[in-house]
Structures are given as C-alpha cells and as structure tokens.
Image (cartoon, rainbow, N blue to C red):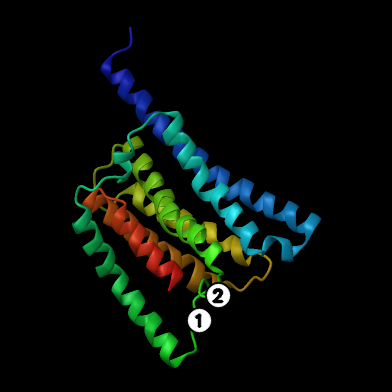
Amino acid sequence: MTTGVDVENMTRNSMLVDVIGNWLFTLIILPLTLIFLIRNFGLEFVTNDYVKLILEFVFVGMFPLIVVLARREKWEDYGFTLVNCRKSVVYGLTLAAPFMILRVYAYLFLGYVGWSWNLNPLLFLPVLVVYGPLEAFFVIFSVYKMDKGLSSKRLVSIGLIFSSILFGLMHIINYIWYPDIMLILRNYVLGNIIPALFIGLIFKKSNSIVGPALFWSLLNFF
C-alpha cells in the first residue's frame, strides 16, 4: 500500500529526475550536436539565424514544454497566470533598469548595437519568443523543479543558485571555438548568472512568469 509519504517522495524524485534530464540534455547533447553540425556543414551553417533559432528552441525550450505536457502539470505552477502580474512587471522593470541604463550609455557613447536590431521582421517575432519568454521559462522550470525536489522554501535557494550557475555555463558554448577566458567570465558567466538569478527571484517573489519574461526580453534584445 502506497502511503502519502511515499507519494510525496516519488513526486520529489520525479522533480529531480526532470531537472537533471533537462540539464543533461542541454549541457551534453547540445555541444555534441554543434560539433557534429560544424564538422559536417561548417561553422557558417551553425551561425545562420534560422539554424540558431531552431537549436535554441530544441535545446532550451522543448524539453521543459514536453515534460509539463506529458506529466499534465499545472501551467500556473510555472507562473502562467495573471495573478500578481503587475507586481511581477514592476519587479522585472526595476531589475532591468540598471542594465538598460548601461545599454543606453553604451549606445550613445561606445557605439553599442544590439545583436537583434538587424533581424528581419519575419524572424524577429519567433526570435523574441524563443530567446525571451521561452528562455525565462527554461530557468523557472529548473528553479521550480529543483526547489520542489529538495523541499527548499528559501528565497535564495539551492535550486535558484544551481540553476543560475548552470545557465551561465550553458552559454560558454557560444565561444567554444574562440576561447577567451576573460570574455567568457565577463559576458557569458557573470552576464548570464546574475540575470538568471534575477529571473528566478522575480518568479519566486511574484509566482508569475510575466516579469521574468519581460526582464529577460529587455536584456536580450536591447
């Protein structure tokens, strides 16, 4: 006979299995896929905007979406709700403000140009969705699952810290062929770990994905 404790333990274990599978898929299969594609089709193929968009969706957004659908989980658990939406937006805009001030300064005085500014209109919308809200959902999925699996209720939790670190490490793959340690530390570890922390914090404070999605979209596209 299965007791309530057994069911709870099974649920926690399944949460951890989901999040481990998610990160293994991204951190192991993605680099192997990139190596295969570059060796067989060349670096220019992988850097094509459409190819990058497909890879981003498959290795960042697809796994969490499949898990939530397959397990018939509540989307509200991941912040897909209008409850606390305004609070979430305020958090997102407030935390994005320092980054945006730096971007405006860089644009006015340092010749900064956002990577997405030259995308054609047909590509901009799907890129916005995948690199904005979907990436935010990827982080939230990891934070939520890990915290539940470890029964962590702290604001600055193990799930938040580990998810943020792994999210930063995930972006190192962008410069695997052009190793520059300082650039990686500055732009792809610190530049992604800190925002990922903020994504998780906004979600945990508001239980809404709206603020995290807005925050990450602003940072990614401007």
Q: Position of residue 105 (x, y in %)?
A: 38, 87
Residue type highlighted by circle 2: Asn
Q: Secondary structure at mark 1?
A: loop
Residue closer to the observer: 111 or 128:
128
Q: Is residue 46 above or below residue 148?
A: below
**Which residue occupies the foreground of this view, 159 or 119?**
119
Can you identify the residue that label 1 sits on? 113
Residue name at image x 62 percent, y 63 percent: 49
- Give the mark toward the camera: 2 or 1: 2
Circles 2 and 1: CB atoms closer than 8 Å: yes
The residue under label 2 is 118
Q: Position of residue 61 (x, y in %)?
A: 49, 47
For this view, does 107 lie left or right of residue 58?
left
The C terminus sits in image quarter: bottom left
Q: Residue at x 46, y 35 (%)?
A: 67
* Residue 97 screen position, x and y as percent: 29, 74
Give the CA separation, mark 2 to mark 1: 9 Å
